Image (cartoon, coloured by chain):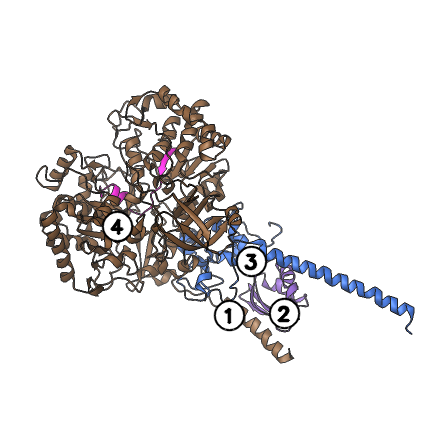
Chain colours: A purple, B brown, C blue
Amino acid sequence: MAIAGLMVHTLQGAAEEVEQKIKKMDTMTSYGIHKDEFIVIVAEVHSKQITQEVKKIEEIDGVLTIYTTYVTVEDED
Amino acid sequence: MNVSRRDFLRTTAAASAFIAMGVPFSWAAQDTTDKWVKGVCRFCGTGCGVMVGVKDGKVVQVKGDPNNHNEGFLCLKGALMVPIIYAKDRVTQPLIRKNGKLTPASWDEALNFTAEKFKQAIKTDGPGSVAYYGSGQALTEETYLVSKIWKAGLKSNNVEGNPRLCMASAVGGYVTTFGKDEPCGSYDDIDAATCFFIIGSNTSECHPILFKRIAKRKQSDPNVKIIVVDPRKTNTARIADLHVSFKPGTDLAILNAMAYHIIDEELDNPRFHSKYVTFMDNEKNKLTFDDYCKFLQDYTPEKAEEISGVPAATIRKMATWFAESSATMSLWCMGLNQRIRGVWANNLTSNLHLLTGQIGKPGATPFSLTGQPNACGGVRDTGGLSHLLPAGRLIANKAHRNEMETLWGIPQDSIHPKPGLHTVALFDAMGEGKVKAIVMLCTNPAHSLPNVNKHRKALAREDTFVCLIEAFADAETMKFADVVLPPAFWCEREGVYGCSERRYALISKAIEPPGECRESIHILIDLAKRIGVDPKLVDFKNSEDIWNEWRKVSQPTPYNFFGITRDRLRKSSGIKWPCPTEDHPGTNIRYVRGKDPNIPADHPDKYFFYGKPDGRAVIWFRPYKGAAEEPDVQYPFVLTTGRVIDHWHTGTMTMKVPELKKSFPSAYVEVNNDDAKRLGINNGDQIKLVTRRDEMDLPARVSDVCRPGLIFVPFHYADKLINKLTLDAFDPGSKQPEYKICAVKIQKV
Amino acid sequence: MTDKSTISSKKRSKPWIFYGSTIFFVIAISFYGYYQSAFPETRCEYGMPHLESPDSASDCYDCHIKSTPKIAQDWYESKHGVMLVKCFVCHGQPDGKGSVPYAVDPDVNATCRKCHDPSIKMMEDKYGLEPKCNDCHPFHNNSLHHEAYVKTKSKKTID
């Protein structure tokens, strides 16, 4: 299981909408919105699926881009 | 992993994202500058206007000048200029080499020492034993002053500059074709052209803002065609409709073949060339259009295909697009100039314009791109080369010498009648001990001369005295200097830069120079007086005084820019010469009645190539000539050198910007994919390059940029002087060396 | 003796796990293999400490095309990419030792104004807009084919 810190950059004003949609994904936890355009997310998912999960977020309307700021794969086998 | 550790890592992950957001850093915002000072970028010959933001006597920001031709835009080098001014290794005090080490000295000590050496050399070996080697990055006033000091004061014509290494062939080309130097069009032509013929230029990396203008032109009208002719598939080729790769050194055949096709398909403009063109062969015999057609029989597209590797159909396509487009603009740079027949390559490109009448109309012009920011205004126009006098006059021409003697107030026939030594010959003469003392300004020949080992030996000679005016202590040439004098850098003094499009623009003084730095004009005036030059010759209080004299000197010639006063320069963002009077707006198009102020309004013909005695431009019959050192069995590859957008020349400035340094920190060699596969070379492998002159190990960058058989090395790196491998064969007409082609063999280390 | 049905059902479920994991394994290996060979002309093995190792430094794109391919490709195809306005011109360098302040979201006044000052001034004068360009002009996606001022909320449609 990898733990990844993600910073989701959305269009100005779209952050709340996007956060709602991300919260529906059970691998994601939201840590809050900053300046109405950034969402801090922590993902807990196997590193092999990370790219897919990130892609899912990217497809949400209003998402500009996602930065992975931190990844640890300490307890993966 | 236990739960608390997982919690910790989750928090860390979130924290990292918060950190990454940070608070936007208003480090140099608009409202934290005291003033914005107008100037010109320190780098390439595009000559973008910049605004320098000053706060508390320090430069804190730069942005583009919205009123200059670049409309506020800058490339990445221009945008990141600020740290260079405050580099830690700026030379801020005079230095004299004592016991092998450069030690601080006073101005008096350093200048007197230099003056003594000069006086001695002149006394024992005559004025021919002293020299000056300058730069297309020096101010116009600096080079004009030097030319006067040396040619009128010291009676030595050994005044040279690094434009000999980059633009001399363009000068030769324009002068032999049109009679006068400098392009007849301007950047405005880019906005009107419908076809761009870009040959021997990586515009996107070497003239980025012009590349932007070309791309914008194409974006506004998708019917605009762009042809890029280059053995490398550079970033410039990204916007090309046709990228033509060819065997290096075969450009002359291709250009002649294009002319052949244009005539064959009757796409030439007989009305234009019968009225305005003289046809001349290599021996300067005046011939006819029919003779030209006969000459071109050796250059059918099929024959050119055999020589160059470019399919005949492609040559035909290029030629058709060139001739049929409503306005064709060619742009070229070092690919054509740094060849042993660079003058011919320039001629043949202009030929195509003269043949088709693609000249003198908006968008139709043969435009030579100038590499350095002030090679045009500073060196070419002021005559800062060993065979020139100001404003297109020639040393070898007695009438010209007499004219300058009158203007400079010296006795008739006192200027030495023979041209001085051109750059390669100058350094050769130093190597033989014939030139004993030299002042060098704003250039780094121990890094940038071709076949540089030979010339470094010349500079190292005990009996060669080198006085170097240099701002950055890491310049290679510092190792060979006997005296170093610290100059004011870029916006620390006021002066003019003249860029590729004949635009003279003013760099205003924004800040005081650091330490004991002095303006170079004052260094030169002081030195000249101490050597014994008549003080009346150097009676200038500041660069404005020098500018006003130079304006007067240009007045009787077609380079007349008398109307470009200092005041006008301060109020505007540059003016294009010819500009005869203060109310003249400047000139976009030369040689056309109504557009060029040198042509009277009632002149009977529309075009007038007044540089030539009969008013006609020349189509030259130039035969094909390959490179000086073609690849052979022993050395099967071609080595070419060049630039990347992130760095300028010898890197003494751009390496001071951390981002630019990190971007391309060290030298490498670009190898073609197929060649690499064949030789078992992988990306990153160390490979050895060997030429007849030297060898060097470099890491490989394998890509599809270079064509098979070609390798490319950027020359910005002092620790990997690729010029140790290049050769100094030069064009017999322009004396410009062939940096672009030499034979090399490569092998995996 | 175990029931025949139990033995056979056990035997039947195992192959599925076996096939499933093999397929997954094969896909993972081939993806890994593709990923490694996809961009042969770039070298990225220094990965994390990339800024400390001077030899591996590059103009960001070489590695970011592998690590953040979407943004890198967006940039490459955009006007900034064609004009070689490289990443560090706006973002600075991540070790913070550069001349441009490091910022994931660059400050308009410190970066954009260097080149786009006339346009920013026009927007301020005409629309009273505070410079926050990214609201309408996506930094990395300013495509050569779109109008620069088309505002899109969705990536799939243009409102």
Q: Residues within 10 Å of mark 2 (few under 14, many from 20)?
A: some
Q: Residues within 10 Å of mark 1 (few under 14, many from 20)?
A: few
Q: Position of residue B605 (x, y in %)?
A: 30, 23
Say the numbered circle drawn on residue B138.
Answer: 4
Q: Chain letter for mark 4, please.
A: B
Residue under label 2: A2
User: Is residue B437 visible in the rendered structure shown here?
Assistant: yes
SS type, badge 1: helix
Q: Residue at x 60, y 57 (%)?
A: C35
Residues flagged by tags 2 and 3 on a common chain: no
Q: Position of residue B10 (x, y in %)?
A: 60, 74
Task: Depth check: give the residue in front, B465 or B601.
Answer: B465
SS type, badge 4: loop
Say the numbered circle drawn on residue C66.
Answer: 3
Residue type at the position of mark 3 = Lys
Residues flagged by tags 1 and 4 on a common chain: yes
SS type, badge 3: helix
Displayed quadrant of residue C131: bottom left
SS type, badge 2: strand
Residue type at the position of mark 4 = Ala
Q: Residues within 10 Å of mark 3 (few under 14, many from 20)?
A: some
Q: Position of residue B479 (x, y in %)?
A: 26, 59
Q: Are marks 1 and 2 in contact (CB under 8 Å)?
A: no
Residue type at the position of mark 1 = Ile
